[in-house]
Image (tube, coloured by chain):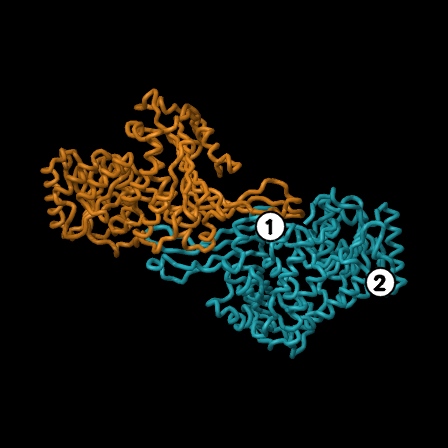
Chain colours: A orange, B cyan
């Protein structure tokens, strides 16, 4: 959330471990490239790709990056600027022995010396999760956990797969790095609407006084995908939607929506309030969790395969591709207000949104004129595919008589601003600027796993649902005491 | 606010006293014509024009009406439908002697008999105010205050020119008619946005809990005109803006904005709450009133004359063409919240709006990033020239950093619905349907004059202002303790 111009950017070396991986080509390189193109990284910065491949040299790695960038849709003239400036270099980590890490350390020092860099370093772990501990230890043991400038470590999710593994990962990380050096990325936190959520809540006196159990009936948080498991079955079979989406993205949205006003708009106070929310969530009852797995069905009119027929998926897989759950936050602000989380693959529509359902008017003085059920006011915070929000409220339909109808006030960033920066651009620059506000803390990760590990250890039955639907019917039943179903806004 | 279809309309005779006057041709006839065109008056209705002119007969009066309607922009094929159906007839009231009123009564009975009408009658006084008492007594003494159906009396503003004259007018009216027969028209109450104000307030749980001194800092009500006095100097010189606009239109908006929730959405409970507001307004201090009179200046780039140079205006006229004032409503809901009223001729822009300024956030946690003064949230209810509303609030500007900027959620009836009915159409149909909700009660009129009569009796000095400006600078000073000026939304 730091300033976006180069003036605030110190010279640095950006080291990517796992530089030949999929995420780097698709997300990391294009974002770094865009930051360079808009001159946000300053003249005094280099990118050092590190991979197990021994056959690359600086030149051939740059050629590969060019191809990746072109595949990611980056215009040719921008690629030229990044790569031909020779701002990208390569170093192999080979088998990842202590000796290999020492070679990496030597290369880092040499590059810094040759280029007059001040010793500021980012180490970005774009690695499979099982390699995290080894890589962290490798860096630490080679003395790469400190320098004469600053040193920062960036970790991609997943941060563990349950409470014990998350604690173990944090422990390794803390053996070699201080918590303030560690930046755990959840790219949802880099989205404009998600950042705006706190501004929206705490810069507008219209909403904050309403943001509580007196005025709000329920909150729904949905992250819906149309895609199936794609090429990720190997990972996904062992993970499932609860680990892949709920524990991180949806729970981040939950804590941002529910948190108290922080004492300042800074990392520590905000992190404190987010963790506090998790500590107030009541243990999740198994009757409040619905798991689903997609069977065949239609997406955009096209017949698609069932999850169990996807390549790499077991024929009797019990992995959930859908989760809906109902949470209760037992604090003064939210007692009695259900929070509903829902995510799934192969749903009807790609759509991420937070719906805040306000309470209905306690008295309906328009009854004799208008007998229809009363709509409650609702605020919809749209995160995907188009960021913005809508406020649904009641107006008098024009003309004689008192007919009341729902209308909406509509706001989309895309209608008012030029295209938004990619979440990764925002987050990478924050790392370089040393602003941890939008990153995940150790205590948040552990509090989140503490909440969901009992659910994982005692999973309800996985129910089938047709691809292209909104999941198993049981997901609607979670809301039945409110006399309605999930808000469907198209 | 009654149902708009002909099914709810009983057969009736619509009698217009002063049928050859200006308002009739400009407003009344086009509205009646439109109601006939959309079949809202049913087949069993007639319009009887009554005027002092003795030379008209039904035929020649219809010809005159055709001309009026064409001048008012009504399409030829619609005029044909209304007038050639012979639904308009004429009767002279000559000198208005008791004998003349008896002739009118006889004609009414004859027309009803010939046309099989059930004896339901509207008497619409489209007369100069000084004739009101005579006309009311004339009707009453001729027995036209009752019939075998219903009889309703419609009075156009002004209802008196101070408390004593208003009381006298009410007294005459009550000598001959019951209060429930009397429909005092303030056409502002027929506007969609004004009607919607109550729906907006009482059908949306998002706003009503905020509608009080805890959440609202101030309210501004502006009715601004670009026009000068035009051809109305004869009346206006003896009236001024306080009588012409503040006592009726702006005070109606004030009472609708400030009133408590009525027990039901019906005339009596709503009238009760409106009057209650007026009884709670503290006596107006003369330092809280600013009067102005336009001098020369430019409107839309055109040089225009000063008020004192308009035809019919005295060279040393002390009549105000501008009023700004600050009121305090001393009840639990509004204690300490200033209400600002402002109206004027020859102002920069034609615009009527209610601005509800919410309080600023009590704490601004974004200070280190964003040092600019904090905007408060505001709800702007736009009444003219385009009906709708806007909600102003703060968002995070996209991109790196925390820059906060004002944005607005925007709603206009014209963008969502076909053209709105004219306020007169709404109100005339309500008279015929017997719904007094949108009309002004005797007690409201007297309470309003009670508030303003002391101001009229002790008028502050009238200050000059340039035509095309926003009035005397002293009007801004009324808000100075709030640290700002009148909201300017263009």
In the image, taking residue A81 as reference, residue B452 lies left or right, namely right
Q: Which residue is mark 2?
A: B138
Q: Quadrant of residue B407?
A: bottom left
Ranked by sequence position, the earlier of labels 1 and 2 is 2
Q: Is residue A264 above or below residue A422?
A: below
Q: Is residue A395 visible?
A: yes
Q: Is residue B281 above or below residue B182?
A: below
Q: Residue at x 54, y 62 (%)?
A: B219
Q: Provide the secondary structure element on which disc 1 rests.
A: helix
Q: Nearer the viewer, residue B473 or B91?
A: B473
State the image coordinates of residue B17 (x, y, percent, origin top left): 79, 59
* Label 1 close to label 2 by CB (< 8 Å): no
A461 over B425 or under it: above or below: above
- Residue B237 in the figure: left or right of residue B48: left
Percent position (x, y) of residue B213? 52, 60
Question: Secondary structure beneath disc 2?
Answer: helix
Density class for disc 1 (Cα within 10 Å; few <14, some 14-19, many ≥20) is many
Q: Position of residue A194 (x, y in %)?
A: 38, 46
Q: What numbered label is drawn on residue B84? A: none
């Amino acid at each position: 959330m730091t300033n976006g111009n180069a003036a605030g950017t110190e010279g640095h070396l950006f080291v990517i471990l796992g530089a030949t991986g999929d995420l780097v080509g698709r997300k990391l390189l294009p974002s770094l490239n865009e930051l360079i193109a808009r001159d946000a990284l300053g003249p005094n910065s280099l990118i050092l790709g590190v991979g197990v491949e021994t056959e690359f040299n600086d030149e051939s790695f740059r050629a590969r990056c060019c191809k990746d960038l072109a595949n990611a849709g980056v215009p040719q003239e921008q690629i030229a600027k990044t790569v031909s400036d020779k701002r990208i270099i390569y170093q192999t980590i080979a088998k990842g022995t202590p000796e290999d890490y020492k070679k990496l350390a030597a290369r880092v020092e040499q590059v810094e010396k040759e280029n007059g860099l001040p010793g500021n370093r980012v180490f970005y772990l774009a690695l499979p999760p099982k390699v995290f501990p080894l890589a962290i230890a490798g860096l630490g043991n080679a003395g790469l956990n400190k320098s004469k400038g600053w040193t920062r470590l960036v970790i991609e999710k997943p941060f563990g797969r349950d409470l014990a593994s998350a604690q173990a990962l944090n422990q390794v990380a803390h053996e070699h790095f201080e918590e303030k050096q560690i930046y755990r990325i959840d790219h949802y936190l880099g989205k404009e609407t998600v950042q705006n959520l706190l501004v929206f809540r705490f810069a507008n006196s219209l909403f904050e006084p309403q943001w509580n159990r007196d005025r709000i009936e329920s909150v729904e948080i949905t992250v819906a995908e149309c895609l199936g498991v794609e090429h990720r079955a190997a990972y996904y079979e062992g993970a499932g939607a609860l680990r892949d989406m709920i524990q991180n993205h949806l729970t981040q949205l939950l804590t941002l929506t529910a948190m108290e006003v922080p004492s300042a708009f800074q990392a520590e106070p905000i992190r404190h309030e987010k963790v506090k929310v998790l500590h107030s969530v009541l243990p999740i009852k198994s009757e409040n969790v619905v798991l689903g797995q997609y069977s065949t069905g239609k997406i955009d009119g096209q017949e698609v395969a069932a999850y169990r027929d996807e390549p790499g998926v077991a024929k009797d897989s019990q992995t959930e591709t859908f989760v809906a759950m109902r949470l209760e936050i037992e604090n003064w602000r939210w007692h009695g207000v259900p929070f509903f989380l829902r995510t799934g693959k192969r749903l009807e529509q790609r759509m991420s949104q937070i719906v805040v359902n306000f309470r209905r008017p306690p008295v309906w003085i328009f009854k004799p004129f208008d007998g229809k059920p009363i709509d409650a006011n609702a605020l919809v915070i749209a995160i995907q595919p188009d960021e913005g929000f809508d406020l649904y409220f009641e107006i008098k339909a024009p003309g004689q008589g008192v007919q009341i109808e729902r209308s909406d006030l509509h706001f989309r960033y895309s209608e008012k601003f030029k295209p938004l920066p990619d979440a990764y651009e925002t987050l990478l620059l924050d790392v370089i600027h040393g602003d941890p506000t939008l990153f995940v803390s150790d205590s948040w990760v552990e509090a989140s796993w503490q909440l969901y590990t009992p659910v994982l250890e005692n999973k309800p039955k996985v129910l089938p649902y047709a691809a292209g639907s909104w999941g198993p019917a049981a997901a609607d039943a979670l809301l039945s005491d409110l006399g309605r179903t999930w808000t469907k806004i198209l």
